[in-house]
Amino acid sequence: MKTINATVLKEMYISGANNLYNHYPEVDQLNVFPVPDGDTGMNMNLTVTSGMKEIQNKESVDLFVVSSNFSRGLLMGARGNSGVITSQIFKGFSLACEGKETLNAIALADCFSKAREIAYKAVMKPVEGTILTVIREASAALSDFVKKNTSIEQAMDYFLEQARISLAHTPDLLPVLAEVGVVDSGGAGLVRIIEGMVSAVHGEVITRNADLSTVSHEPIQNDIPLYAGAKLTEDEEGYGYCTQFILRIGEVGTGKRAFNEKTFLRFLSSHGKSVVTVRDDDIVKVHVHTLTPGNMLNYAQQFGEFVSITIENMSEEHHNIEHGQVATDMAGNIERNKARRNAEAAEDNSETEEIVTEKPYALVVVSSGTGLDEMFRELGVDQIVSGGQTMNPSTEDFVKAIKQTKAQNVFIFPNNSNILMSASQACEVMADTPIKARVVPTKNIPQGITACMQFNPDLEADDIFKDMKSSLKTVRSGSVTYAIKDTDIDGVHITKGYYMAMKDKNIVSCVSDKKEALLDLVGSLVRKNSAVVTVIVGEDVTPEEQEEITNSLNEQYGDDYQVDVWSGGQPVYSFLIGVE
């Protein structure tokens, strides 16, 4: 094949998106720090899936239309830093397609070069050894390789080869990757996308696998140490019954119990293997391998009613699973239903949408946990975007929240370093509207609380922003969470299931008791000039534990500092600590 037209490009995009979907759990497992936040694969998957929805059911013979629609979908669906960078890669590719009816190998190389250029521009301080390195090195190699007579197949095969080589070298550029024994997760996700695109140019468009546990878990390249203890064991692969269901969560007071995601997941994990859950509003999709599927269903029905159920004996029906893709691909069904709702909403709110502003200022924060939500509302926050570690909101989520404020100036508090880029991208989307949105670069909840408290509506917008941003320097913060694997980082031995006291990404200690971890962390954060110690307890901390912790902190620090202990109800983190 000498050229790519709109039809082939569409197939490449869809195949790339599907291949990433089939392998995103592996990418999630490339987790440098042993905390339960390995969500790079999910973020990239949701981002690219959003782009695929924009082109999947649309016919076009215009190369640029296909590419720009895909790019627009990625932009609005971008989640996490990896998702935002991925959206910028394909934005660059799209820009290079403008005015072209087809792409030959040389033009294709130019598109990937533009992809690299735009991706690097999107990152204020590019870090090598990441997805940026992979697109830079692979695109540069491709530009040197292609000639007039180079076929598309040859070009894409070479591009994939170079991307794999670049990925293998990411630990040489980021020592922390080498220390833990993994390659960069964002780069790995990009390689999976490229693999799917290569398959399409060879005439084989990859489809989504109904059951991700049946996907081959071979490394991206045989000599690349892709996993850090992530590969499924043979026992997990063939464990009892493959049980999948969609549960519609019921309302408390209608005979159903209140749904708690962490508790729900803990039960599934203790009674099965290969657990995957996907939540979309009031719908929860579950995949689990278990010897007792009836127990799973009885437990789940306490929280709602089933939309659909699929149970298969893996030892007897392994070879038949592939024939039930449409029926069992429930994550795909959820995404398709959500896409349909979004499409209907887009028709109702087309480009003629009028954006109304009714007040001068508004605050938008990212929060997860009923206690945290209430704290932010008391501080005068206008819109709360649900999310945080493990569930990063998309660019579109921020855009909707910004519009709903109906304010002339909107200040966004991401409260997570992995959400900063999505929030910033939303501000760019709003640039040509009557609303001026800007991001106060809060990287954690304590910073977000401090910055919100600094808000003074009597000042001009620029002064408000400056004061809130400056206040971040006054906060020292950290967190306590549990370790998901055994490893060693910075001289600290990490034991799976133990509690880690973390000051940013520096691990202070790893101990079996959460209270001990908290005291270790507070001790590392306080200084002579500190005045206030704030501890926000998570959903796994009981009222009795909270009272005991409050007494211990006051006994140890109450004479010198103001100690505030609040119930945040946040998942994942037992404690969030801020010292001012």
Image (spheres, grey):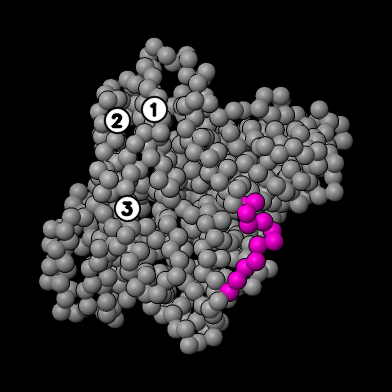
Main secondary-structure element of the magenta-colored stretch: loop
- Quadrant where the image shows the N terminus: top right
Q: Residues within 10 Å of mark 3 (few under 14, many from 20)?
A: many
Of residues 136 and 217, the one drawn nearer to the viewer in this rendering: 217
Residue 34 in the image: x percent, y percent?
36, 46
Residue 381 in the image: x percent, y percent?
42, 71
Secondary structure under tag 3 reads loop
**Is residue 347 in the magenta section?**
yes
Of residues 424 and 529, the one drawn nearer to the viewer in this rendering: 424
Q: Is tag 2's residue or tag 1's residue first in the polypeptide sequence?
A: 2
Q: Which residue is mark 1?
A: 309
Instruction: Name, please, the residue furthest toward the right.
Output: 148
Say if mark 3 contacts mark 1, CB within 8 Å.
Answer: no
Tell me which amino acid carries mark 1: Ile
Q: Which residue is mark 2?
A: 297
In the image, taking residue 318 as reference, residue 421 lies left or right, namely right
Q: CA distance from mark 2 to mark 3?
A: 24 Å
Q: Residue at x 33, y 66 (%)?
A: 374
Residue 564 in the image: x percent, y percent?
23, 72
Tell me which amino acid carries mark 2: Leu
Magenta span of residues: 346-357
In the image, taking residue 249 as reference, residue 175 lies left or right, namely right
Mark 3 vs mark 1: in front? 1
The quarter of the picture where residue 388 lies is bottom left
Q: Which residue is mark 3?
A: 571
Q: CA distance from mark 3 to mark 1?
A: 27 Å
323 is higher (above) or lower (below) than 565: above
Of residues 154 and 27, the one drawn nearer to the viewer in this rendering: 27
